[in-house]
Amino acid sequence: MPIELQINGQRLTTAADPSTPLLWFLRDELRLCGTKYGCGMAQCGACTVHVDGQAVRSCVMPIGALAGKPITTIEGLQGPVADALRAAWTELEVPQCGYCQTGQIMSAAALLREAPQPTDQDIDAGMAGNACRCATYVRIRKAIHQAAAAARGGAK
C-alpha cells in the first residue's frame, strides 16, 4: 500500500516497505545524505530530523508511521533560527570532525523553538542524547546561546 510522505515541503508517494527506517529512506531513496547514520539505536542523535516540528531519531522511525506528517531534514531546515544556528556554528568553528553536526543543529533548532532564550540547563536537556565524539560541547552550547540572541535580534 502506498505511503504519502511530506519531506521538506514536498509531497511524495512511495511503495517502500512501511517498516523502512526514515533514515534509510532519506539517504537511499531520496539521496538526502545530510542526515547521518551513527548508532542505529536512537542513542547518538546523528540521524535527528524534525517530524511535526519535534526532533526525532530517524534511524528507528518507520516511514509507515509518518504518513501525512511534515518531515524536515537538515537540507530543508530554514528560517531565522536555522540561519542563526548556521552562522553561529560557522563563526565559532563548532565542528571538529563534523559528523554529528547536522543532528546537533536539528536538535538545537527544535530546542530554540521551544525555548527561544535558553539557559545552560535548557541546552543540556534539549541536547541530551546528541553525542559528539570530538567533545565540542562547550562550543555547541556557546553557538546555541549566540544563535538564540541573533534569532531574537539581539547581540551575540
Image (cartoon, rainbow, N blue to C red):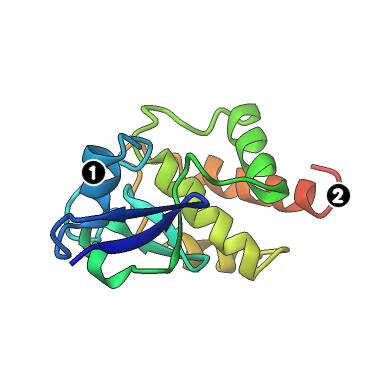
Question: How many C-alpha atoms fall within 10 Å of the one at disc 1: few (<14), some, or many (≥20)?
Answer: many
Disc assigned to residue 75: none
Residue beneath label 2, please? Answer: 153
Question: How many C-alpha atoms fall within 10 Å of the one at disc 2: few (<14), some, or many (≥20)?
Answer: few
Residue beneath label 1, please? Answer: 37
Element marked by disc 2: loop
User: What's the CA distance linking mark 2 and mark 1?
Assistant: 34 Å
Residue 93 is left or right of residue 22, and the answer is right
Residue 65 is left or right of residue 71, and the answer is left
Residue 13 is left or right of residue 72, and the answer is left
Residue at 29% x, 57% y is 58
The amino acid type found where label 1 is placed reads Tyr
Residue 18 is left or right of residue 106, and the answer is left
Residue at 68% x, 50% y is 81
Residue at 62% x, 50% y is 144
Q: Is residue 1 visible?
A: yes
Q: Circles 2 and 1: CB distance less than 8 Å?
A: no
The amino acid type found where label 2 is placed reads Gly
x, y percent for residue 97 = 36, 27
Instruction: State whether residue 88 is above or below residue 103.
Output: above
